[in-house]
Amino acid sequence: MAELILSLEGTAQGRTLALILALTAAVLHAIFGALQKGRHDPWISRMAIDSAYGIIALPIALFVVPWPEPHMWPIFAGAFAIHLSYKLAQGSTYVKGAYTVVYPVVRGTAPLFAVIGATIVFGETFSAGQWLGVAVLMSGIFGLAVYNFVYLDVQRDTLPAALALAVLTGGLVALYTTWDAYGIRSTANPFTFLMWFFAIDGLTFPPLVLLFHRRAVARIHDWGALARRGLIGGLVAFGSFGSIMMATRLDKVGEAAVLRETSTVFAALIGWLMLGENVGPRRLALMALIALGAVIVEFSG
């Protein structure tokens, strides 16, 4: 599998596969966000999810994929620090803000920062048409956040802090996207980066939650339901993160990051189709704007 991925780098087939992987990551990321902001405390949900994918990844990292080259360990250390900061910011955002408002803000902030990061780190360039696509996509995402704020019942008392944290989280999403793209391009086998990242990341965050949120952990009674949510979330995380990382190895980091932000559309569709939420013409128009921005970015390159 690794040889096939490597053979597609820099080819037209690789670009097409990167597009498919980025959109797959968008769908799975929308599902992942709903799983974390679910029936359990966001910190507890994240503990269960990380534990699941850490336990699954560890034996694969140790016995299946090649071990990382020596220069990869500082990269893993940086990835862990960035992802830890992201999780802390994301968890705080979900605690203080309504998911329907803060999620679009996070996703709307991330692509702009990611494109800037890809320009600085990888020397990528965006055409005028692609910058227009980024602007269209971001206007749709932020418009969706404003709509949800105006028309939906949200946590208004903590909203200013939640929005500030959402912007911070979006910046950290862009930072980890850029850093991880650098990491997966720095090793001979991309699956080495993925499996070792999941093993390290998945088995270091849960102990912190157990330590600093002991009271919340002590109140858990439905451990079976939490374990099932963690397993599902862990598998979704493999698909979501793995897809976007492979997309950044095959094609431009900035384009993959922008396409992933169509997750906001898929989040709304999930709410409509599976949760019975009313979409309405305004939200449908904003979702179409997000999709249009992604299309402009992809086909203006």
Image (cartoon, helix red, strand yellow):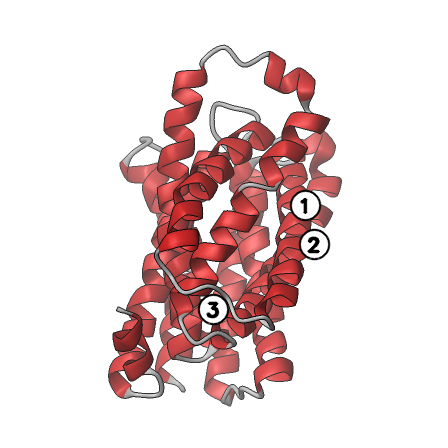
Q: Residue at x 43, y 36 (%)?
A: 52
Front-most of residues 216 and 111 = 216
Q: Residue at x 59, y 52 (%)?
A: 105
Vertical comparison of 38 with 1: above or below: above
- The CA distance from mark 3 to mark 2 is 17 Å
Mark 1 is surrounded, within 10 Å at the Cα level, by few (under 14), some (14 to 19) or many (20 or more) other residues, namely many
Q: Residue at x 31, y 71 (%)?
A: 2
- Please give left or right for residue 4 compared with residue 63 in the image: left
Q: Secondary structure at mark 1?
A: helix
Mark 2 is surrounded, within 10 Å at the Cα level, by few (under 14), some (14 to 19) or many (20 or more) other residues, namely many
Q: Say the numbered circle drawn on residue 89.
A: 1
* Circle 3: residue type: Val
Q: Which residue is mark 2?
A: 168
Vertical comparison of 274 with 169: above or below: above
Q: Secondary structure at mark 2?
A: helix
Number of marks in picture: 3
Q: Earlier in the sequence, mark 1 or mark 3?
A: 1
Mark 3 is surrounded, within 10 Å at the Cα level, by few (under 14), some (14 to 19) or many (20 or more) other residues, namely many
- The CA distance from mark 1 to mark 2 is 7 Å
Front-most of residues 199 and 128 = 199
The percent coordinates of residue 76 (x first, y second) are: 60, 61
Q: Say the numbered circle drawn on residue 258.
A: 3
Q: Earlier in the sequence, mark 3 or mark 2?
A: 2
